[in-house]
Image (tube, rainbow, N blue to C red):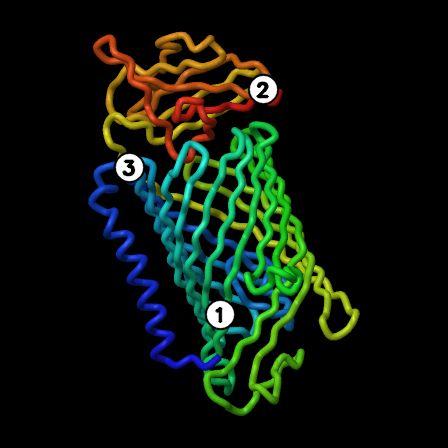
Amino acid sequence: MTVTFFYKNYRSVLLSAIMMTTIAAYWSTASAQNLETEVTLSAGSGYASNSYLIPMIPEWERRYISAFTTFTPSARMRYAGSGRSITVNGIGQLLHFYDERPTWGGGYLTTTFRQRLSSSFTARASGGLGSHATSYNRDLQWLQLGVDWLATSSTRLEATAGSGWRTIRNLENMDDMTDRFTTYSLGIEYWPSFRWRLRMNFNSNLDHLSSPGDGFSSTVSATNHRFNGLVLMLETGLEQYTVAFQSSRETETGSTDNGLFNDDENTLNIQNRFHRTTFRASYPVSGRITLTGTVAGLLWFSSADDEIEPDYQISAGIQVPFSLRRVRSGELRSLDFESERSGRTTLTVRYRGDANLYITGDFNDWEDPGIPLRKTNRNRYSVALDLSVGMHQFKIAKRENDELEWLELPDDAPTVNDGFGGKNGRIIIDY
């Protein structure tokens, strides 16, 4: 594949134009509804035998075993309302190795638009740009379409397909090399209880529909939300990627330790299959500081012989979020649960303004107006409920001048179809 400088820049400009047009198209509408802005600063240090195990680093490098330090600022802006939302994420990363390798820097910018089609289906479109600079430069652009299906109150299925481009620049004496990929992914998420989430994902190339094993990623993960905000996650899976980068003009062929270059076609071929297992933990020590830890292992299966080589990574870090939210008066902005082992559950909602809020559900036979919520501080209301083991459904209403108005739950709240074209909230108690 021959790629000229003009073509690569045209592709990036086109993708940037699509992203900015989407943001601008919904700015006036969204700004009058819900606005959420969130900035997070993360820093961490660790030790790795393969840089591929370091989050967000797309580089397979196992010649070095080194300590490293990362600094990751991220920003998220989200607008939502009337069954649709648009989210813009920006993530930067600075990575310093304590060996002869240069400091790495880069980041991603992504935009995702979601449209609710029905009480069970949501369509989404996303696009993004990314770039990392090391001893060479690696650029990435992609566009994807997908759909989410809430099959049951505790089961969600998703499917995504799209296309993207990877470009390697300034690699030794090679000219620019590019690889176009068309991918699809399938996923299922299941909550067997209030605190456990199980997830399975499979990703492959659309060119490999008849032989998905030629290049794929498959993972299974279990996440446990413990008490006091502690979150534990274990993920394992088998992955294989096959990439063929072709130079835009013939140059003198480079060389690597693994002989990845094809002298006849001036092509860089990369093929690896490996089994990876990762354990992550996060714990909020305060409302502003969260401690994180990661232990990851990787078994690499050589494509040249039967050799199996292990890699590992261990790291710890800290996250500091800064949130600025503007909520339109009369709307629920967030909904949180805190359950005790006795079965007593505290529900807290964020609501801008003064109002008489009530909750009703199967735990009180849907009695109107329900159980009143108490205003605990500015824009926050809460209620304590004694719930039995199992799943419970509920609605939240506002009462004004003897009239009851059902409030729409936030987009990220766990819900179930109420049978009337709307949604009920759901709470799962497992003890």
What amino acid is at disc 1?
Arg
Q: Are marks 3 and 1 in contact (CB under 8 Å)?
A: no
Whole-percent x and y of residue 269? Answer: 60, 76
Q: Are marks 1 and 2 in contact (CB under 8 Å)?
A: no
Nearest the eye: 74 or 193: 193
Nearest the eye: 43 or 222: 222
Q: Earlier in the sequence, mark 3 or mark 2?
A: 3
Give neighbour class at mark 1: few <14, some 14-19, many 20+ (Cα, 10 Å): some
What amino acid is at disc 2?
Gly
Give the quadrant of residue 45.
bottom right
Per the model, the C-alpha gap separating discs 1 and 2 is: 48 Å
Q: Nearer the viewer, mark 3 or mark 1?
A: 1
On screen, residue 243 above or below 262:
above
Whole-percent x and y of residue 245? Answer: 53, 76
Whole-percent x and y of residue 197? Answer: 58, 36
Give the quadrant of residue 169.
bottom left
Whole-percent x and y of residue 304? Answer: 74, 75
Give neighbour class at mark 2: few <14, some 14-19, many 20+ (Cα, 10 Å): few
In the image: residue 70, left or right of residue 197? left
> Which residue was labeled with disc 1?
180
What amino acid is at disc 3?
Asn
> Which residue was labeled with disc 3?
34
> Which residue was labeled with disc 2?
390
In the image: residue 64, left or right of residue 370? right
